[in-house]
Image (cartoon, rainbow, N blue to C red):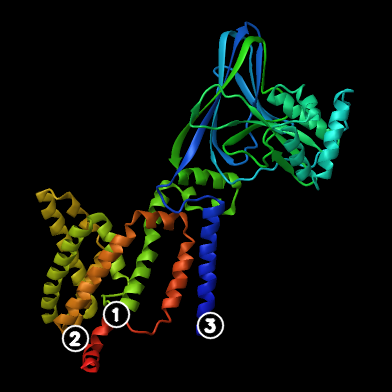
């Protein structure tokens, strides 16, 4: 394969891996670190009324279209009431019913929401409204304002903004004063603006919601204005004229219909309260991925059973250890016994911990090496000799476990997790290197293997890296591209710089 082909695959694999990671992080909201937290608001609606002894029905609009927020979960506490939910126009409504309602009755609706970039479909294009009929006093004032707005605007959006600016002027003119005279509440003010916009055939409506805070009781729904520009609904604040949804504004319903209705009861009351808490961002984002129906939610490792998740948390760190091994051998020049033996030893260190793992590894390899030298004198064939070393390694592990159990060293009991075959092959390779290249080279490779295993253990047990690989397994493609790139490296290794010491010394002299 040519260098051009290698570069092509390096770029393609890295681009795919990093692109998917960026998409999952910025669009789906999956955090890059495991300890990030998200703000979660718990909103509760409490409906209370006094039953009259007969049948009772309660209707309550529920938040459905919540731009800027993700509904994590919702609960209903309705005692012995029957409960159904249905779509009513643009809204979702909960319907409670009971055959006999006596004394005080209390119903609860609770929802947890968190910030989210999920966009909302506000619905299709509405019909053009019929122009309303204004009174003799209002008609000329409204017409004068509309004439001024028309001259200072170019489309529906700028028309609405200019109209709101004039109607909310700090120093209103006589025409604005006439309009304000019949709008004492926020609801009446928005209704007046909608009627004015109908006069120029601009579809408009009001949406209602609450402003989320840290902790607050007795919240009341506040209205916002929406106009349709022929393609989409645009939201404005009816008092400030600002475009867009206000920060921390949770939309509850669309339209003027009452938020709740009670039949068969007296003294009905609705109380809305909110409180804020914090949850792990990964849990919030995972729920958002499922809500978005993204293709990545079907292939997410977090959808697997917990037992399988634990397996993959470990397996996904093996490629990372392999990449580390490639770096240390290719660029640094550390010599080891085998290619992946240090990675497997590093996995065993996860259970024994680093210090005791080094102690047990050194002891077993040292004793096994002495026995291997004795087996050499017996002139055994290769396969029987390897089988003998394997058996001896198992015996050493049994003796070590029994001895440490007597001493009460529970940590050392996990020595059984050491890969027996790898230990046997390490002993065999080390003895052959000892005979062919001398004790110094054998010790150098043995220490190099142990050093790489130690570094691999520190990398493979890093909590941030484990989280990153588990949530973004597409980073395996980035590691693959890195390995392909390193596969073409033909330069010097760091340890080879010692070969040129004499040359550099002569040049300086």
Q: Which class describes the residues within 10 Å of circle 3: few (<14), some (14-19), or many (20+)?
A: few
- Marks 3 and 1 sit apart, C-alpha to C-alpha, by 27 Å
**Rendered location of residue 231, percent (x, y):** 78, 47
Question: Which numbered disc, 3 or 1, marks the residue that appears first in the sequence?
Answer: 3
Viewed as shown, does residue 82 lie left or right of 316? Answer: right
Q: Is residue 268 above or below residue 473?
A: above
x 84%, y 36%: residue? 146
User: Which circle, 3 or 1, is nearer the viewer?
Assistant: 1
Q: Which of the 4 image quarters holds residue 456? A: bottom left
User: Is residue 484 shown to the viewer in this render?
Assistant: yes
Real-space Cα separation, disc 3 to disc 2, in angstroms? 40 Å
Discs 3/2, front: 3
Q: Is residue 54 above or below residue 151?
A: above
> Residue 4 got which mark?
3
Q: Secondary structure at mark 3?
A: helix
Residue shown at the point (21%, 90%) measured from the top left: 505
Q: Is residue 256 visible?
A: no
For the residue carrying disc 1, how many other residues have a C-alpha within 10 Å: few (<14), some (14-19), or many (20+)?
some
SS category of the residue bearing label 1: helix
In percent of the image, x 50 and y 52: which residue is there?
300
Asked if the residues shown at circle 3 and circle 1 are in contact, with their CB atoms under 8 angstroms apart, the answer is no
Between the residue at mark 1 and the residue at mark 2, the CA separation in whole angstroms equals 25 Å
Instruction: Report the residue marked by disc 1.
Output: 494
Q: Quadrant of residue 194?
A: top right
CB-based contact (under 8 Å), mark 1 and mark 2 = no
Vertical side of 246 occupied by 46: above or below: above
Q: Earlier in the sequence, mark 1 or mark 2?
A: 2
The mark that comes first in sequence, 3 or 2, is: 3
Mark number displayed over residue 222 = none
Residue 277: horizontal and vertical position, in percent?
45, 34
Q: Which residue is mark 2?
A: 436
């Amino acid at each position: 394969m040519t260098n051009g082909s290698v570069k092509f695959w390096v770029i393609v694999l890295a681009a795919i891996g990093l692109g998917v990671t960026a998409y999952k992080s910025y669009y789906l909201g999956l955090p890059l670190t495991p300890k990030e937290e998200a703000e979660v608001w718990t909103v509760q609606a409490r409906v209370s009324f006094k039953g009259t002894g007969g049948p009772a029905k309660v209707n309550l609009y529920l938040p459905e279209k919540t731009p800027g927020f993700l509904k994590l979960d919702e609960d209903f506490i309705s005692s012995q009431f029957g409960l159904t939910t249905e779509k009513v126009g643009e809204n979702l409504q909960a319907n409670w019913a009971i055959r006999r309602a006596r004394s005080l009755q209390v119903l609860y609706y609770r929802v947890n929401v968190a910030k989210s970039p999920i966009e909302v479909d506000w619905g299709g294009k509405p019909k053009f409204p019929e122009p309303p009929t204004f009174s003799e006093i209002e008609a000329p004032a409204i017409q004068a304002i509309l004439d001024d707005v028309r001259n200072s605007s170019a489309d529906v959006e700028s028309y609405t903004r200019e109209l709101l600016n004039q109607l909310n002027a700090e120093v209103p003119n006589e025409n604005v004063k006439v309009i304000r005279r019949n709008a004492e509440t926020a609801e009446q003010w928005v209704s007046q603006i909608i009627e004015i916009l109908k006069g120029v055939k601009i579809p408009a409506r009001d949406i209602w919601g609450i402003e989320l805070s840290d902790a607050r009781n007795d919240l009341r729904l506040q209205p916002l204005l929406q106009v349709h520009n022929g393609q989409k609904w645009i939201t404005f604040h009816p008092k400030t004229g600002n475009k867009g949804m206000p920060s921390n504004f949770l939309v509850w319903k669309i339209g003027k219909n009452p938020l709740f209705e009670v039949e068969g009861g007296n003294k009905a009351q609705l109380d809305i309260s909110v409180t804020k808490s914090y949850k792990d961002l990964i849990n919030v984002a995972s729920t958002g991925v499922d809500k978005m129906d993204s293709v990545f939610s079907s292939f997410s490792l977090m959808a697997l059973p917990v037992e399988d998740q634990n397996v993959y948390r470990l397996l996904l760190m093996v490629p990372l250890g392999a990449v580390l091994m490639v770096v240390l051998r290719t660029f640094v020049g550390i010599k080891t016994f085998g290619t992946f033996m240090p990675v497997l030893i590093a996995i065993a260190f996860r259970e024994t911990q680093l210090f005791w793992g080094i102690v047990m590894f050194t002891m077993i390899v040292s004793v096994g090496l002495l026995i291997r030298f004795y087996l050499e004198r017996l002139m055994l064939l290769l396969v029987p000799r390897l089988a003998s070393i394997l058996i001896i390694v198992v015996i050493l592990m049994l003796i070590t476990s029994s001895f440490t159990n007597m001493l009460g060293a529970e940590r050392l009991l996990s020595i059984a997790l050491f890969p027996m075959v790898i230990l046997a092959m390490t002993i065999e390779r080390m003895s052959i290197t000892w005979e062919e290249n001398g004790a110094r080279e054998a010790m150098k490779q043995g220490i190099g293997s142990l050093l790489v295993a130690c570094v691999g253990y520190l990398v493979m047990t890093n909590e941030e890296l484990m989280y990153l690989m588990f949530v973004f397994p597409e980073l395996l493609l980035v590691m693959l591209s890195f390995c392909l790139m390193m596969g073409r490296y033909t330069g010097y290794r760091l340890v080879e710089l010692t070969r040129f010491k004499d040359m550099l010394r002569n040049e300086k002299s």
